[in-house]
Image (tube, helix red, strand yellow):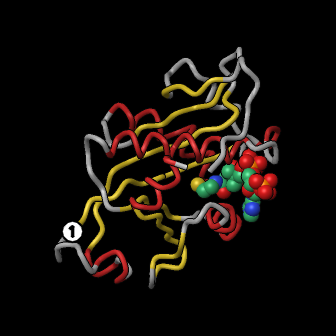
Amino acid sequence: MSRASLPGEWRIELLAKSHNRQQFDCGNTSVNDWLKKSALQSQSKRLTSTKVLIGTTSRIFGFYTLAMAQVDFADLPSTIAKSLPRRQLPVAVIAWLGVDIAFQSHGVGKRLLANALKDCFEASEVFAFVAVVLDCVDSNAKMFYQRFDFAELPGYPMRLYLTYRQLQQMMQA
Ligand SMILES: CC(C)(COP(=O)(O)OP(=O)(O)OC[C@H]1O[C@@H](n2cnc3c(N)ncnc32)[C@H](O)[C@@H]1OP(=O)(O)O)[C@@H](O)C(=O)NCCC(=O)NCCS
């Protein structure tokens, strides 16, 4: 996936108390509420990690949250599962992703997704996983992710995955 370019003064950093979470509005209440009410606490408990896109102020233009999880062998498509042990298997999770309405449709979501996948790939050098998975908040989110090669997990219409091999190929392209 090629990276959309952002103005030089924009940067992506780990969510901190100093960031203005309350002003953020991506148009989806669940995604907004996660950032405003839960992301920082979850991060301090070491359950998830959230990165925000900011400019020269504390305003958040967009963010994504990553986590680790396990999926059952039986839930993976046979193409991936055939060579894997029959047990719970480690996966990286893109738990949340959102772009403020004021900045949507300018390549910011694509840039954040590319960064999230890069973070996953770098983490995989230390903590191995077999796929990146995510749960879509709605059908719009699903269409967004499907543009970037995420496929439906059989039996779970709103859960998408990207195999580790696909991730590796993307990062090496
Ligand atoms: C989904 C979301 C992150 C997209 O962010 P964005 O900054 O508007 O997206 P981009 O401008 O980077 O779009 C990248 C590409 O995806 C396409 N795209 C964007 N939203 C899309 C959608 N809902 N369905 C299909 N394609 C979509 C764009 O047309 C663009 O295509 P291109 O590369 O051919 O030009 C944003 O709309 C959002 O925050 N939505 C609410 C929260 C949400 O649904 N989060 C995801 C699940 S947690």
Q: Which residue is mark 1?
A: 88
Please provide percent x and percent y for residue 148: 62, 60
Please provide percent x and percent y for residue 89: 24, 65
Q: Nearer the viewer, residue 127 or 165?
A: 165
In the rendered picture of this protein, how many numbered marks are placed on residues? 1
Residue positioned 58% across, 32% down in the render: 52
**Taking 19 as reference, is 164 above or below it?**
below
Amino acid type assigned to the residue bearing label 1 in the image: Gln
Residue positioned 37% across, 53% down in the render: 92
Q: Quadrant of residue 53?
A: top right
Please provide percent x and percent y for residue 25: 72, 42
Q: Is residue 109 left or right of residue 137?
A: right
Task: Tell me if the residue at label 1 has its CB under 8 Å from ligand 1.
Answer: no
Q: Is residue 117 left or right of residue 109?
A: left
Residue positioned 68% across, 68% down in the render: 143
Please provide percent x and percent y for residue 33: 58, 46
Q: Quadrant of residue 102?
A: top right
Q: Mark 1: which secondary structure? A: strand
